[in-house]
Image: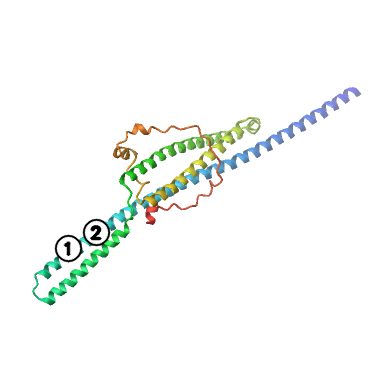
Amino acid sequence: VTRHNHLKDFMLVVSIVIGVGGCWFAYIQNRYSKEHMKKMMKDLEGLHRAEQSLHDLQERLQKAQEEHRSVEVEKVHLEKKLQDEISIAKQEAHRLRELREGTENELSRQKYAEQELEQVRMALKNAEKELESHCSWAAPEALQKWLQLTHEVEVQYYNIKKQNAEKQLLVAKEGAEKIKKKRNTLFGTFHVAHSSSLDDVDHKILTAKQALSEVTAALRERLHRWQQIELLCGFQIVNNPGIHTLASALNIDPGWMGTPRPNPSHFIMTDDVDDLDEEIVSPMSIQ
């Protein structure tokens, strides 16, 4: 009987140890899963910030292009108005000269001559203003078209890189949603903690964030570079009639340019994704 009681006590102790060990193991796994989920959610928030940064930059680009177009229209209107004023001044000077030539009175002829001289001076002053408004060096028209075509080809490759980044973003979001649904089930926390899906989703989130970082950096660099080129050349490049119209004007077969194909992406992490406060100012509007 005593031996039987010892055996029962031993089995009870073993059961208690196993129960406590199981509870401790479940606690550790649950804690690990929560920490990993917390890290994944933090990475997911960073991904959302990177996505929002790219979206904000594209909105500022669109706004700058609209302002660019309105400034260009206003510039054409002012040039036409200035030319009309010069033409009116020339006509008035011609009329006064005819009056002077047809007048016999010396005082009247002198008066008309002074008025004619004043009109000529006004015409010369307006002509000087018009001359100052134009650059001293004018680039060939063909150069503008080639630069516009170069810009459009570069935009095509950028759009492919952007599409790849958006696909990775979608995959990362879908993976995060699946993890959240699994975690809400009965044994979801235990299952997630013992599977590699959490690490895979975390890796996809980081990869998508890196992709968006590279796309954002490429867009920002492209905007700055073409703004500087527009300033140096003095004509529009970003706002153009489109790649097909340009190719036709330059007598280029669109097939020669080929269709850009997406390459396997190797993304590099950038540290300044969340800092996109630089203002996009159109160089033509500055002029």
User: Circle 1: is it few (<14), some (14-19), or many (20+) Cα within 10 Å?
Assistant: some
Quadrant in which the N terminus appears: top right
Which type of secondary structure does the marked residue at label 2 adopt? helix
Q: Earlier in the sequence, mark 1 or mark 2?
A: 2
Between 148 and 162, the residue placed more toward the observer is 148
User: Circle 2: is it few (<14), some (14-19), or many (20+) Cα within 10 Å?
Assistant: some
What number is the disc on residue 91?
Answer: 1
Q: Residue at x 79, y 28 (%)?
A: 15
Between 135 and 174, the residue placed more toward the observer is 135
Q: Is residue 68 visible?
A: yes
Q: Is residue 110 left or right of residue 223?
A: left
Callout count: 2
Separation of marks 1 and 2 at Cα, in angstroms? 12 Å
Residue 246 position by quadrant: top left
What number is the disc on residue 83?
Answer: 2
Which type of secondary structure does the marked residue at label 1 adopt? helix
Residue 64 x, y percent position in the rendering: 40, 51
Residue 13 x, y percent position in the rendering: 83, 29
In the rendered structure, which amino acid carries the disc numbered 1? Gln
What number is the disc on residue 80?
Answer: none
In the rendered structure, which amino acid carries the disc numbered 2? Gln
Between 122 and 198, the residue placed more toward the observer is 122
Q: Residue at x 62, y 40 (%)?
A: 39
- Residue at the far bottom: name it: 107
Question: From what the image shows, is residue 116 above or below residue 158?
Answer: below
Display colour scheme: rainbow
